[in-house]
Image (cartoon, rainbow, N blue to C red):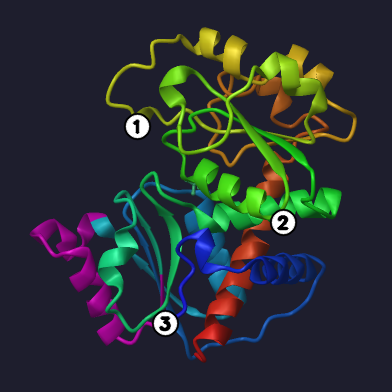
Amino acid sequence: MKNIVKMSDLTNEEVYELITRALELKNGAKVEAREDLFVANLFFENSTRTKHSFEVAEHKHRLNVINFDAATSSVNKGETLYDTCKTLEMLGCNMLVIRHSQDAYYNELSNLNIPILSGGDGSGEHPSQCLLDLMTMYEKFGTFENLNIIIAGDIKNSRVARSNYNMLTRLGAKVKFVCPDIFKDETLGDVVDFDEIIDKVDVCMLLRVQHERHDSKMGLSKEEYHNNYGLTKERYNKLKESAIVMHPAPVNRGMEIDTKLVEAPKSVIFEQMKNGMYMRQAMIEKIIKDNNL
Ligand code: CP
């Protein structure tokens, strides 16, 4: 079974193929309609972009879409994730899109005979977000080699930081982090001073402060966080002419980024969302092909 649940599931060549295909789709390439296939979307955590862009992508492939509703499902009677997914397999689903709060939830699904596209696992990885981020950078710069990338925010709790750091490093980019001590992840790269690096970066990627994953208070007010670790107007004005500003969203406006900068000329935040739909189409196409569906 060929899944896409973490970036190590993909070779560099496969990543470039997905980017190329997603850009072709953005430029109007057509996909094969597959009215015979069923896909179930299982989102056990909240989502707007990932859930609905997968849904739009699935409809573009003319798949039959089942939007599993965890709140009204038998999960509330104690049914396990495995039994839920096995049930959907037995009902004839051909692929599953899953977001779950448990890190590496997919490990307990390895006996399923149905491919999985992950919409994010706990604080683990977010492969479709990583791929759409790569697509957005590649669209702008045409390469990852020697790109200077700063990832600023809640690194420790971020599946986007983990997927992007590992993949961008693999592809030759130089990635550094900006964050307060409580958000540091020692397993990832160097933490640097935002003001010392801001004028050298090609990509300034901001990450959401994930209040829902903190078991204690951050110890910084919204203003203190913004002034020390956020993209202020002053920092924005120091960016290179060619630099881009990214954020996977949802955005805490006025915290990670000044609200007036969300749609500033260097911001590609909403373009990332648009690209996400094309990337998820490319991922679905790859899952269909790799699993001979
Ligand atoms: N970027 C992202 O994963 O957004 P959602 O949580 O809305 O899917």
Give the label, 2 or 1, closer to the camera.
Answer: 2
How far from the left and from the top, in percent, is residue 130?
A: 59, 52
Where residue 24 appears, x then y in whole percent? 79, 70
Q: Is residue 201 left or right of residue 182?
A: right
Question: Between 174 and 16, which is closer to the camera in this rendering?
Answer: 174
Name the kind of residue labelled 2 in the image. Met
Do the numbered discs 2 and 1 sit on residues whose CB atoms are within 8 Å?
no
Q: CA distance from mark 2 to mark 3?
A: 25 Å
Q: Residue 212: which disc?
A: 1
Q: Residues within 10 Å of mark 2 (few under 14, many from 20)?
A: many
Earlier in the chain: of badge 2 and badge 1, it is 2
Q: Is residue 124 left or right of residue 259?
A: left
Nearest to the observer: residue 130 or residue 31: 130
* Mark 2, secondary structure of its residue: helix
Is residue 249 or residue 174 the one in the foreground?
174
Q: Say if the magenta span includes residue 93.
A: yes
Q: Report which residue position mark 3 lands on.
A: 1
Q: Quadrant of the N terminus?
A: bottom left
Residue 243 appears at what percent x and percent y? Answer: 82, 34
Residue 27: mark: none
Residue 31 magenta: no
* Secondary structure at numbered mark 3: loop
Magenta highlight range: 71-96
Q: Amino acid at mark 3?
A: Met
Left or right: residue 293 compared with residue 194: left
Q: Are marks 2 and 3 in contact (CB under 8 Å)?
A: no
Residue drawn at (21%, 59%) of the image: 72
Snapshot quadrant of residue 244: top right
